[in-house]
Image: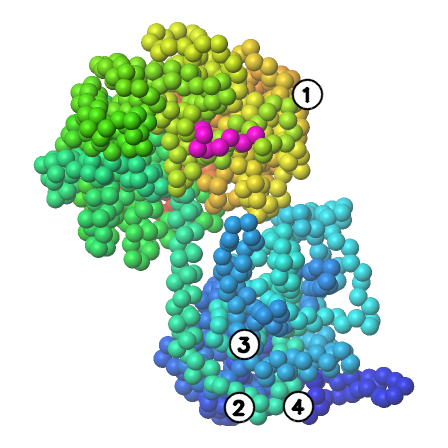
Amino acid sequence: MSLKHCRSSKLASVIPHPALTILTIHVAWRRPQAPPVGEDPNHGRLDNEKYTVGCICTLTTEYVAAQVFLDQEHPPPEFTAHHDNNSCTLGRIGEHNIAIAVLPGGEYGTASAARVARDMFHTFPNIRIELMVGIGGGAPTSRHDIRLGDVVVSEPRAGLGGVFQYDLGKKIQDQPFRSTGFLAPPPPVLLTAISGLRAKYEIHGHTIREDIEAILAANKKIRRKYGRPDTTTDRLYNSDVIHSPGEASCPSCSNDGLGLILRTARVEDDDDPAIHYGLIASANQLMKDAKLRDQYADENDVLCFEMEAAGLLNHLPCLVIRGIWDYSDSHKNKEWQGYSAMAAAAYSKALLSQIPPSKVRVEKKISEILPSIQQDIAVLRHKENSRENKIVLDWLTVVHYASRQSECIRTRQAGTGLWLLNSPEYQRWLHSNKRTLFCAGIPGAGKTTLASIVVQDITSRFEKEKNVGVAYLYCDFQQQGRQNADNLLASLLRQLAQGLSSFPDSMQTLYASHKKEGTRPSLNDISRTLESVAAMYSRVFVEVDALDESKCRSTFPSHLSSLQVSTSANVFATSRPIRDDVEEILESVETFQISANSEDIENYIDSHTSELRLLHEKNLDLSKETKAEYRHEIKTIITSVVDGVFLLAQLHLESLIDKTTLYSLNKAVKKLPAGGHALNQAYGETLGRIRSQSNDLRYLAERVLSLLACAERLLTTSELREALAVRQGSAILDENKRECTSIIVSVCAGLVTVDDKTDIIRLVHDTTRKYLRTHMSYIKPQKSRTTPDGPMEDDNMQEEEVAMADAHRTFRIICVTYLSFNVFESGFCQTTAEFEKRLQTNQLYEHAAHNWGHHARQASAKASCRIVIEFLKNSRKMIASSQALLMSTESSWHPRWKQEFSRRMTGLHLAAYFGIEEVMDPLFKGLRDAAARDGSGRTPLFYACMNGQANVVKLLLARGTNFNAKDDSGKTALSHAARQGHEAVVKLLLAVDVVGVDIKDNWGHTPLRLAVEKRHDDIVKLLLAREKVDVNAKDLWGHTPLRSAVERGHEDTAKLLLATEKVDVNAKDLWGQTPLSRASRNRHNTIVKLLRA
């Protein structure tokens, strides 16, 4: 600080030097001047135009620190702009009049900072330079010894303006993420002042610490919060040490000190706090990931992270000054916030004292560039809203069906399906409300294609009408694990919510009510929100394909019916014939019988006969007339034999592709199977063609088909290619053993198809999967075969079951070998970023972790378990697998919690999870193993009960484990089994006399309450049969099991409870509400009658 601009100073020390005497100057703190008592409160008030410097703070702590460094505090302004909602303090530093504003309480982020700046410039139009002063997270490296209490000043580096927005950028394949959002560099007057002050500090040192002490000495009230903490609290942890959730402080993070980075203490000659100059990274989220912090520090030389500066993007001449209060990691250190804010404010005052007022007056008024700032705010607000909305949508569900829709439309033959769109039944449905068009058809009739045609018709027809909502689902047997009623309704809700011009408040409310505790909404919560969002449209269309392939046909249609009643929505559904079920539930059902239309089949054949080698245009040995004649004959015969099965037409045409003479073509056409067994015959002949290929091609096709047939879920091409490249006994994946996707598709002779958008490779139809699973012996991979077998007709079920078990054994070996690769020897990923990188670089990792146990359980009994036991005994590789199993991308609402409990799992936990009975005994090391708890307090018995593994439960019960042990949520094994609906497991547990049936979890829920909530009526009956069960047990909110059933509209469950004649129908909750009042409020009229009876 120069003497010229120091109104009051004192000589602190004189340091002798051979050539000169250097004076170290301290800024003497003087309490901001205010009018004496009894004097005019307007005394000292300045016109708004007199303020030329603006300062924005984020937190109250920063705001206080900035205020106490004022030389003089001014009265509030006489005038504020109409839309200025800022809290603002006015005052003077040196010869500069400054306005200090703070963000509204609870608001953070770039857009909030931009709005505060905009409002400030409306009220103080003469502000010409802007400071952002406060705290930030440090990014210490070997190049920058950043410590708590240090100050970081934004300064241009490598063409960057001093601040960049690290959550705004682009990702190019095989290149690191590249940020594209940069703050304009500070104006020259500020950069000049930084250089001047930096030089003075290098020569004389600074007095920031002494200046802070002077202020605290004069104002003891703020000393505790804003004083300098003890240096021992400045702990820098290794990047792989993560703070334990739920722990208020960090001592437990590294009790032995091994997790800390040792740094030499600063000595008298060192600046303390140190001032650092360089890049500051800004975003809309708090940086709490040490490994990501280090990545930005290494790649971009970032010194500090914060959340507001990028809100002043591009246009505002601004300097950012941050005191370091933590290290941008998971560890908490709020005790440094006050002091760090004081350090930043002290530097800001020293900097302003370097600048002559005349230099500020020649700068351009910021209000003159206000339109550009307002435009930035609108863009930022839109981006921030979009980001926040996506967080809510992804939290709800990441499952979507747009790619499936695109795939169906891509493979659809142009012009097909028009007969449905033009039919009277469809037109009645289209132009009415609250109607259901139920399209039933036999397998292979083309139902899915027709469903996609309807979706395309509705979306294109109402494309410009924003008040018409469209949502659709494609049910799939192989997706049953994720297609429960909750997820199906959630997907409909997501589609309708994101189709609205403004994001629905009800979605934000749903998210907010579960975000804090990391809970999930109930089925009824989702259903009510769906009805609320759908009501915002004038019309709603819902399409559901393959309703018969959904495992929740008993619950899902009833919620669709509620949606129809409340919003007049139209439902279009395809299915195999189950009309009676639908007719009883959905509204105004009209049935339409689907079968392959002859015109559609003819169009398809006309478009694909040119693919036959013999009839191809390049075959010049046949005349055009001959080719046309054969095309016509093929079309006529295929159309006559397919009997309404479109898939059969595809298979028949595929069987003719490789015919090379007219004789072989004639013979094949005349032998095309027809009648009720035609589809199976066609599949048999297709397998015959596959088996007639050369050994290498046949062996590849057999491996592909057997893996796809027994896969627990759909595979991507990358996953399948890695699976095919795995060799038992290998420690790495040999990239040279990957098969080519195009060859995979080719050798399978039309039985597999690839979705170009999702990269999913699937069997061409569900009937294909069912056929292969009953004919596994014919596709059992063998490296050599002397003669190909002919078409299959008679099934040997016992032989096929053995072959199926062998296929599961093969997939088990692939998965376990893969999970035992050297790449997983490092064990648990410490951060989400590291885990996601592992997922990206190991394509089969997640699938193998989720499914190896299912294949092991279904493998042939004679199969050796040695490879599984070795894997489960390798704790590092086993934990790496459990992390992928339990840290599902679909459970992203609380990923950190999932990481924590998975790291303490044992091999016994994992074996119990999957129900692999054969490996339990070799893994047992005594009773201690059976009682081992993971990070969530769960023993192996918990996992067996949660997943319905009755055989393993029986085995563990025989070991005498603690039957009533609670996990961290307070639930017992019985609680989990009841909640998940595993009747056989519940029976086993209830057979143990000492099992507690009324043990409450942390929310006061008993096993009965959990079974009632999930509508598991068979389990409700089992629990009610126990004489001592408390049917009126209340949770923390005073809700009884009856109240839970009533609120969710579970009529049958309510009847079971009422039949005990022990239920208190008038039980009141904490708000005085009874089951009857809740039933009335939710319009469950039938239940109201039950309660009044």
Q: Amino acid at mark 4?
A: His
Give the Cα distance between marks 3 and 4: 22 Å
Residue extending farthest right: 18
Q: Amino acid at mark 1?
A: Lys
Distance from Cα at disc 4 to Cα at disc 2: 17 Å
Q: In whole angstroms, how far apart are the C-alphas of marks 1 and 3?
A: 65 Å
Front residue of 175/179: it is 175
Total tally of numbered discs in the picture:
4
Residue 361: image tag:
2
The amino acid marked with disc number 3 is Cys
The magenta region covers 737-744
Considering only order in the chain, which callout, 1 or 2, is on the residue closer to the N terminus?
2
Q: Residues within 10 Å of mark 4 (few under 14, many from 20)?
A: some
Q: Are marks 1 and 3 in contact (CB under 8 Å)?
A: no
> Which quadrant holds the C terminus?
top left
Which mark lies nearer to you, 3 or 4? 3
**Residue holding disc 4:** 5
Instruction: Tell me if I can see residue 556 in this picture.
Output: no
Q: Is residue 995 above or below residue 89?
A: above
